[in-house]
Each structure stands twice: as C-alpha cells, then as structure tokens.
Image (spheres, helix red, strand yellow):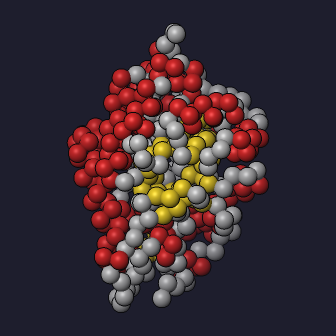
Amino acid sequence: MVIDLSRSKRKWDHIQYALETGQKRLTGFDDIKFVNRSLPGSNLDSVKLQTEIGELSLSSPIFINAMTGGGGERTFRINRELAMAARETGLGIAVGSQMSAIRNPEERRTYEIVREMHPDGVILANLGSEASVEQARAAVEMIEANGLQIHLNAVQELTMPEGDRNFFGALERIAVIVQDVGVPVIVKEVGFGISAETASKLHAHGIRYIDVGGFGGTNFAEIENMRRDRLLTFFEDWGIPTAASIIETKSAVQDLSVIASGGIQTSLDIVKGLASGASAAAMAGSLLKILMEHGTEGLINEISLIKEEMAVIMTALGVHTIKELHQVPFVISGDTHHWLSQRGIDTRSYAQRSNL
C-alpha cells in the first residue's frame, strides 16, 4: 500500500496551524448576558449534567469534537490522549475525517485507537459530504461508532490549494447515508456556521442532528491561506458567529437536536450555548492547546474544572438540568442582536423567558 505522504503532511500542518492561529473569541457569546436570579431556589448538589442528542445519551453535554487522524504516529498519539481524557471525564468524542484511512488502511490505527482507549464511550465517526454510503458504513465499522458526523467545509475546500471545487449533490448523498448507515447522522459545519436556510434544507432531507460549527473558533480559511501563494483573505472573515448560528438553527426547526461548537473555550460559553437551544457543546481547538501544553493529566483536570463550573453557573441560574437551561432568560446585545434582528428573529423572546 502506497502511503499518501501529501495527505499525511496536510493533516499535521492543520494541527500546527490551528495551534498557531488560535481562537479569537468572535463567537458572539460575549453579546449574551444572563438575567440574574437573586432567589435561584436551587441546590448545587442537585444539578445534573446528563443530556441527549436524539438517541445518544451522554453523561455530560461536553463533547470533544473532531480534530485529527490519518497523519501517522503524531495524530495517533493525539487521538490516544484525547480518548483517554474523554474516558476519564465521561465525555463523548469525535474523530477527524476518516477518508484517509478508507483510502489507506495503514492509517486505520490512528482512528481505531480512540475506541481502544474509550471502549464504552460515545464515539462519532467522521467523513465529508463527498462520502458514499459504503464509505460511511466503513467509517462507522472502523471505530464501532455510535454516530456519524458528516462535515460541511465548502469554504475550507475552496481556500485549500488542492481542495474540492464541485459541491453538487451533497445534500442528496447525505440523505441517502441517513437512511442506510444505521446510526444517527450529525451534519457539522467546520467553522463557518449553519444558517436557518441550511437547517431547513437538512431537516427536509431527514437530518435531525446538526453541529453548527460557527465562526469564531479555529479559522480553517486562515489555516489554508497559510498554505497558499495567493491568499483568499476575504474568506478569513466569512461565516455566521456561533451564538447566532445556534439561534438561527433552532428558530428554523424546533425539533432539531443542536450541538453548539465553534470557538467554545469556557464553562460560561458552554452554558450560553446550551441556553440558546443546544443539547450539547463541542470543544476542539482550546482542548488541543491544553493537551499540547499540559499533557493528558492537564486536559483531564481542565475538563473536570469546566464541568464543576457549569454546575455552579446552573445553580446561580436556578436550574438543575440541561432542559431547564432552555428556559433561562438572557439579553442579546451588540453584533449578535443586530445579526438576528436583520435575519427576522425576535431577540426579545429570549429576554422575556421565565424559568420561575
């Protein structure tokens, strides 16, 4: 079997550039402020972090989102350590795109290690929208996945020097996979956000789970520009901020299960994402940075602290469950208010909710 060295190098380049470019906190979450409850009537010991994404039950709403795999020994080690942290903290985890392992079986081990390290956990397989049903089944089988992410990354591909340029038929391919793959399918953006229109189209084709992957976190247009001679800088500011994308998606279709992702770094970000309508929140770049700087134990400690802080915030808000968070009032200001108002969404409805 011939190893695709260019693909393997690209995988590692993405990791390095993601760490170099970082996250600029442009998610819109700073525009969301909770209404204080001086009489919360709550008890920290009664807070429950369990949640559900459709038929997937999770002990925590935090998910380690897709990052890597298929880049040889270095990505093998990253996935092993991420899976160990997920196991020790009770989190679900998604692997990076598995197309490299489908094309080159020698790369399978860089993904299979996640199931080996996290044998009882919720694990998501991952492929792009170009995948066939057969490839989707192979990706799920490879890691005994509980679900499958199909990522949408048109802007990244267009910026990528060797990326795809043809996006015809993606929605129809995803719809076939949903019908035939046998596990829940989560459609995920990679940092440019899901709009209300896209959410409606996906729902009409049978998709019930969406990871919004909003703007404000790792910027794959910026990363791909680092690999170009002539830069497409106009794509570096392209996308729907995460907070706005969550609200757009839920406003378009109420019965969608939404995962908040895109630049989520803190416990407060997570709680704001959940209060905006998400059932879970996925983190990637911020956790990768902690892993690379402080190792597996440092990552486990940080995740544990985030979970503790979430419970503290929920207690201050007077709620004990993730579902109750969906009724907590908050005020939307700034660019996020302007965006949502221009998009025809009544932001006052969030400020006037009551969980009393």
Q: Is residue 45 above or below residue 22?
A: below
Which residue extends farthest front?
Answer: 120
Q: Is residue 137 left or right of residue 123?
A: right
Q: Position of residue 205 (x, y in %)?
A: 76, 50
> Image quadrant of residue 111?
top left
Observer-nearest residue: 171 or 352? 171
Q: Is residue 245 above or below residue 239?
A: below
Observer-nearest residue: 215 or 167? 167
Observer-nearest residue: 225 or 116? 116
Q: Residue at coordinates 60% horizontally, 31% vertically from top-left?
A: 138
Q: Position of residue 227 (x, y in %)?
A: 48, 25
Q: Is residue 145 above or below residue 343?
A: above
Q: Position of residue 104 (x, y in %)?
A: 53, 18
Q: Residue at coordinates 37% horizontally, 88% vertically from top-left?
A: 41
Q: Residue at coordinates 66% horizontally, 37% vertically from top-left?
A: 129
Q: Position of residue 100 (x, y in %)?
A: 53, 24
Which residue extends farthest top?
Answer: 2
Q: Is residue 79 above or below residue 246?
A: above
Residue 9 seen anywhere in this rendered image of the structure: yes
Count of residue discs: 0
Q: Residue at coordinates 77% horizontally, 55% vertically from top-left?
A: 204
Residue 273 seen anywhere in this rendered image of the structure: no
